[in-house]
Image (cartoon, grey):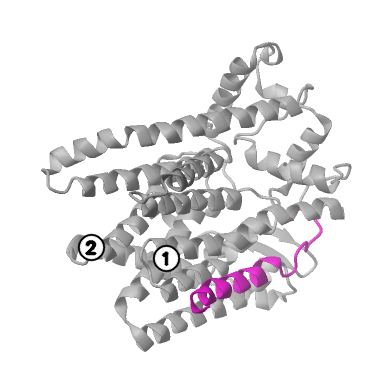
């Protein structure tokens, strides 16, 4: 029973932080204005255009169809009232947010962290304010993050079973990983970072299997050995991605506002032509230099949380996409520390594997944003933020042992949970006086 205590603690903490104040406010918050339009289009069968693939929207729509959601109300502006049936749709991202800390606990255990440090990683994710905000409303990024880390977890389970007698179970985990990696990509193209992570991990594992050869021969042999591995992820990814668009088109047979973005012949080409045309237009829209946004932020500013996003305001209530500052800042320091450790320390193979996992995961989900020219926002840092939380746990895992490790981990958690509580009114939209609001604006750029 003792081994179940850490994940049970993570589950209980995550349930509290995610499901408390569920449904408040019963008003449109931030980009729910777009989500409402997309879901209403499915209900009416009219074509809409979005810069992202439709899987997450389809999942929420199907849930709404099963629960009897009604899209007759107005959802075009922040603050518009939401009927109960629409508020209920927020359960989809909230459940994803609730599950994420548990998945991170399991991923941390598989990568070699102790139960205590894995629990610490899970709890840091459970008490991270910005991740909770993204999961409380009909927004889709948290679904991408969860799907991607589930893909990583299933890949880890596959790696653990290589060489065992039950090869069927091994293949099932690998196939499941490919499916969830495709799910992440079919929510947003940035989800491609997860299959890229997994391919890099598999390539490194293949190099280790060829340890007796020279570096060049090991690299070439590893590259050849992962071809079939990559082919599986590509085939599964394409099949799921195409299937998602097939369902998407079947639900939108009528002309609608999305036609303005497409050619006049769009509805008369075959499925393949429609799929190609739409994805080309999606790419153009993503590459388009959109107007500057008041709350946009640059990639370099995310690790220090230089610019949060104002989501909603009531009479004396406010919701910001503002993270837990201590987790952001401790995480940034930890990533830099891990990079330094990787350069100067080469002993302890098990620690090196977990260190490489965290650094590669962080870089793959952070560096690509350097090359994106369109306006970006703090929520683009979510996956890298989770990796930085794991970096905190990694440092705690190696800095001490026994009671000392417990004391240090407890101290870090106590500080981060206190920070979470202090900023929680901006997470849940609780009453704040003007003075209390300003007291939480620690940096001038937060206002």
Q: Is residue 332 left or right of residue 3?
A: left
Q: Residue at x 38, y 47 (%)?
A: 364
| Residue carrying label 2 | 349
- The picture places residue 150, in percent across and down from the top left corner, at 51, 52
Residue 50 in view here:
yes
Which of marks 2 and 1 precedes in the sequence? 1
Residue 400 in the magenta stretch? The answer is no
| Magenta-colored stretch includes residue 28 | yes
Within 10 Å of disc 1 (Cα), the crowding (few <14, some 14-19, many 20+) is some
Q: Residue 78 at x, y = what percent?
A: 76, 51
Q: Quadrant of residue 427?
A: bottom right
Vertical side of 351 occupied by 178: above or below: above
Around disc 2, counting alpha carbons within 10 Å, would you say few (fewer than 14), some (14 to 19), or many (20 or more)? Answer: few
> Residue at label 1?
109
Most distant residue in the right direction: 72
Q: Position of residue 240 (x, y in %)?
A: 57, 33
Closest to the observer: 103 or 261? 103
Determine the secondary structure under disc 1.
Answer: helix
- How far is mark 1 from mark 2, CA to CA? 16 Å
Which residue is painted at 31% across and 81% down in the image?
A: 400
- When the figure is inspected, residue 37 is found, relative to residue 296, above or below; the finding is above
Q: Which residues are magenta?
A: 1-29
Give residue 253's position: percent from left, percent from top. Answer: 77, 22
Q: In the picture shown, does residue 76 fall above or below 50? A: below
Residue nearest the observer in this picture, 63 or 221:
221
- Residue at 59% in and 19% down: 277
């Amino acid at each position: 029973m003792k081994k179940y205590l850490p994940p049970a603690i993570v589950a209980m903490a995550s349930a509290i932080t995610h499901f408390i104040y569920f449904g408040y406010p019963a008003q449109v918050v931030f980009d729910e204005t777009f989500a409402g339009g997309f879901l209403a289009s499915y209900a009416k069968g009219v074509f809409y255009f979005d810069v992202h693939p439709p899987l997450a929207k389809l999942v929420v729509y199907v849930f709404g169809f099963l629960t009897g959601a009604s899209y007759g109300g107005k959802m075009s502006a922040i603050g518009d009232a939401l009927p109960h049936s629409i508020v209920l749709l927020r359960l989809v991202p909230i459940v994803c947010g609730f599950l994420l800390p548990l998945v991170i606990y399991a991923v941390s255990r598989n990568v070699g962290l102790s139960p205590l440090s894995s629990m610490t990683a899970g709890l840091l994710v459970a008490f991270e304010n910005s991740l909770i905000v993204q999961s409380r409303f009909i927004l889709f990024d948290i679904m991408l993050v969860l799907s991607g880390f589930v893909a990583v977890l299933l890949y880890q389970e596959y790696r653990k079973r290589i060489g065992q007698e039950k090869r069927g179970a091994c293949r099932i985990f690998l196939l499941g990983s490919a499916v969830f990696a495709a799910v992440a990509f079919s929510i947003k193209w940035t989800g491609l970072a997860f299959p890229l992570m997994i391919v890099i991990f598999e390539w490194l594992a293949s190099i280790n299997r060829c340890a007796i050869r020279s570096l060049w021969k090991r690299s070439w042999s590893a590259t050849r050995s992962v071809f079939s591995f990559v082919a599986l992820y590509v085939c599964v990814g394409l099949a799921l991605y195409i299937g998602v668009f097939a369902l998407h088109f079947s639900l939108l047979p009528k002309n609608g506002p999305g036609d303005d973005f497409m050619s006049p012949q769009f509805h008369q080409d075959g499925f393949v032509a429609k799929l190609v045309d739409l994805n080309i237009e999606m790419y153009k829209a993503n590459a388009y230099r959109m107007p500057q946004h008041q709350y946009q932020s640059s990639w370099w500013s995310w690790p220090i949380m230089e610019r949060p996003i104002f989501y909603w305001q009531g009479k004396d209530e406010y919701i910001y996409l503002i993270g837990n500052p201590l987790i952001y800042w401790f995480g940034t320091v930890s990533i830099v520390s891990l990079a330094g450790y990787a350069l100067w320390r080469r002993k302890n193979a098990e620690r090196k594997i977990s260190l490489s996992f965290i650094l590669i995961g962080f870089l793959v989900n952070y560096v690509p944003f350097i090359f994106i020219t369109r306006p970006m926002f703090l929520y683009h840092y979510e996956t890298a933020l989770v990796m930085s939380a794991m970096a905190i746990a990694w440092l705690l895992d190696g800095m001490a042992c026994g009671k000392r490790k417990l004391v240090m981990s407890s101290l870090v958690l106590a500080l981060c949970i206190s920070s979470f509580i202090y900023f929680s009114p901006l997470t849940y939209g609780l009453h704040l006086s003007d003075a209390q609001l300003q007291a939480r604006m620690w940096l001038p750029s937060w206002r």
